[in-house]
């Protein structure tokens, strides 16, 4: 029975913190195989035709559901089982191919992208990753065909980001079945057909597949949300629900790891769906800025307007590069992509939100009207920094892993006095040598095009600075660094910027090597992205040097007052 891999594996982002980036994991920039790329293009074109010619997001919002007819149509078009193996009725796409098609959903409707993402990225995914052959044969064909919809039931009334401490309880019975009790909330597709439910038991966390309509399963009432109006978000209650033994995924004790592995895998499609949405925001903005005249000039001729449009194009390019670098890790068989996936989700959801606000600003009052597509996007996209891992929690996850890696390297230095002079010398020598090499010869990106030497050198310098800043945080705060969330935030910003720049340089290098027709345009967008990102990284390093007491004191007086302190 498949179980999560517990073996320590190399991680590119983690290696950045140590100052020795494992560039062999990410360069050369990954590209799809020809058959996968061809099949992906075919399905992406199919999705775009259906979504632009048949699907009506406004009707879905009025009806409060994307529509069973839509789900049925998407299933018949092969769009509800994109990564499922062909032998189970799916399209058999790679992770890159799946995420590329999901971009089409993000272009048209954030709500439908969420419904399809819940069904495929996290609902179907645990069965696909951890199901036995019998379990796959039992559920995947209907899920791939859109005859059934899947859900991922993890969040509870008292449990959000701290998912390890779920309160739903599963008690193993003498015949091997499980008796399930508890409540989940904010569950997309929670009133539908196949729910992967996470619970605790005497044997550890478990992942159980519960079929809709099982006795003791109760759903509703539906949550009324600010956006995603066509997405059914449900409470789901389990009262003495008997789950057959054959519905257990993995082994008893694997449940939490299965949940985390599923989320790590599923977050990537959010990055590409948001990139798709940003392309629509940009298209609408260019059309408006071209048609709208003020002071005898079209808006697009004004420098501040042009700046916003150029920024959006460059950010889309960078987000695409980062997202498909991450999916490429999965497709190449890299076992640990948890930090890259979390980082991509944070960058995508934050950047998408900023881009949407800039697009609305360009449209002026028009976009504030309730029936404008950007107004709908405003309602729908605000959830992305919150769900599938709140961004602040994911920032901490990435930074703490990096801090831990550096802390492990520095731990022997804390014991210098215990081994005498000779022991101290043996301990210090490798550290001093490594530090000297990193300082004098920061590691360059291997294999990038010679015309990108300057860009590669800039990334190397930032990487060396990240190691120095991380080391300083570890030595200054010791174990208490796990409570220094401002430090973690700034380290994350730096690591995210460096990773995104690496992705952009890798992507551009590949385009130059192949002589792509888009090469010169890519150079323009890459240059703008790299400049903006480097400034962000530099700002993060400066913030690490600032005294955080001002923020803490401001929070203290506010907390004491329970409101604005001078009101």
Image: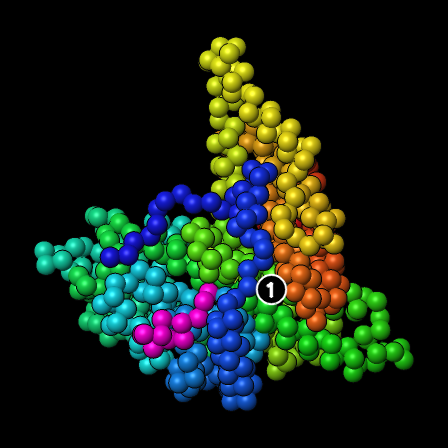
Q: Is residue 415 magenta?
A: no
Residue located at (87% from left, 78% from top): 297
| Vertical comparison of 277 with 315: above or below | below
Quarter that holds the N terminus = bottom left
Residue located at (68% from left, 77% from top): 283
Q: Is residue 479 left or right of residue 253?
A: right
Q: Position of residue 209 (x, y in %)?
A: 26, 65
Instruction: Determine the secondary structure under disc 1.
Output: helix
Q: Which residues are magenta?
A: 85-95
Q: Position of residue 82 (x, y in %)?
A: 42, 73
- Label the magenta part by its dominant secondary structure: loop
Residue located at (48% from left, 71% from top): 36
Residue 223 showing in the rendered view: no
Residue 192's image quarter? bottom left
Q: Is residue 89 magenta?
A: yes
Q: Position of residue 349 (x, y in %)?
A: 57, 61
Q: Is residue 398 left or right of residue 499?
A: left
Q: Is residue 117 left or right of residue 323?
A: left
Q: Which residue corresponds to mark 1?
A: 320
| Vertical comparison of 421 with 368: above or below | above
Which residue is situated farthest in the left direction here?
A: 174
Choose between 487 and 238: the one closer to the eye.
487
Choose between 429 and 370: the one closer to the eye.
429
């Amino acid at each position: 029975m498949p179980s999560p891999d517990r073996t320590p594996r190399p991680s590119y982002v983690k290696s950045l913190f140590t100052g020795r980036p494992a560039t062999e994991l990410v360069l050369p920039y990954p590209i799809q195989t020809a058959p996968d790329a061809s099949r992906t293009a075919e399905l992406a074109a199919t999705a775009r035709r259906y979504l632009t010619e048949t699907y009506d997001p406004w009707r879905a919002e009025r009806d409060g559901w994307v529509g069973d007819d839509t789900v049925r149509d998407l299933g018949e078009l092969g769009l509800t089982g994109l990564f499922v193996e062909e032998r189970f009725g799916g399209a058999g796409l790679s992770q890159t191919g799946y995420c590329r098609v999901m971009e089409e959903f993000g272009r048209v409707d954030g709500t439908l992208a969420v419904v399809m993402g819940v069904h495929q990225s996290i609902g179907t995914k645990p069965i696909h990753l951890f199901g036995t052959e019998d379990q796959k044969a039992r559920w995947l064909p209907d899920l791939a065909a859109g005859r059934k919809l899947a859900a991922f039931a993890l969040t509870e009334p008292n449990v959000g980001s701290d998912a390890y401490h779920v309160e739903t309880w599963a008690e193993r019975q003498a015949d091997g079945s499980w008796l399930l009790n508890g409540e989940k909330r904010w569950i997309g597709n929670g009133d539908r057909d196949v729910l992967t439910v996470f619970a605790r038991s005497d044997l550890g966390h478990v992942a159980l597949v519960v079929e809709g309509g099982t006795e003791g399963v109760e759903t509703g009432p539906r949550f009324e949300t600010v956006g995603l109006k066509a997405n059914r978000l449900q409470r789901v209650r389990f009262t003495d629900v008997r789950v057959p033994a054959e519905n257990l995924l993995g082994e008893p004790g694997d449940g939490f790891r299965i949940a985390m592995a599923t989320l790590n895998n599923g977050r990537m499609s959010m990055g590409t769906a948001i990139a798709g949405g940003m392309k629509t925001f940009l298209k609408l903005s260019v059309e408006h800025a071209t048609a709208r005249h003020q002071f005898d000039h079209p808006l697009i001729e004004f420098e501040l307007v042009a700046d916003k449009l150029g920024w959006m194009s460059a950010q889309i390019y960078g987000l695409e590069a980062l997202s498909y670098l991450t999916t490429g890790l999965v497709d190449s068989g890299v076992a640990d992509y948890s930090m890259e996936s979390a980082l991509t989700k944070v960058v995508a959801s934050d950047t998408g939100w900023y881009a949407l606000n800039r697009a609305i600003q360009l449209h002026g009052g028009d976009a504030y009207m309730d029936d404008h597509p950007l107004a709908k996007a405003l309602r729908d996209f605000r959830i992305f920094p919150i769900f599938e891992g709140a961004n602040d929690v994911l920032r901490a996850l990435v930074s703490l892993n990096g801090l831990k890696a550096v802390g492990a390297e520095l731990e022997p230095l804390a014991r210098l006095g215990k081994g005498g002079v000779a022991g101290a010398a043996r301990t210090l020598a490798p550290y001093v040598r490594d530090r000297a090499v990193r300082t004098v010869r920061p590691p360059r990106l291997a294999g990038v095009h010679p015309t990108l030497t300057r860009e590669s050198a800039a990334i190397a310098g930032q990487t060396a600075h990240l190691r120095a800043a991380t080391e300083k945080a570890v030595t200054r705060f010791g174990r208490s660094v796990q409570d220094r969330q401002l430090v973690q935030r700034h380290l994350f910003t730096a690591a995210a910027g460096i990773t995104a720049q690496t992705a952009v340089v890798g992507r551009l290098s590949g385009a130059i090597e192949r002589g792509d027709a888009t090469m010169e345009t890519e150079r323009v967008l890459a240059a703008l992205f790299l400049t903006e990102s480097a400034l962000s990284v530099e700002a993060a390093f400066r913030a690490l040097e600032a005294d955080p007491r001002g923020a803490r004191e401001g929070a203290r007086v506010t907390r004491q007052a329970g409101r604005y302190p001078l009101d």
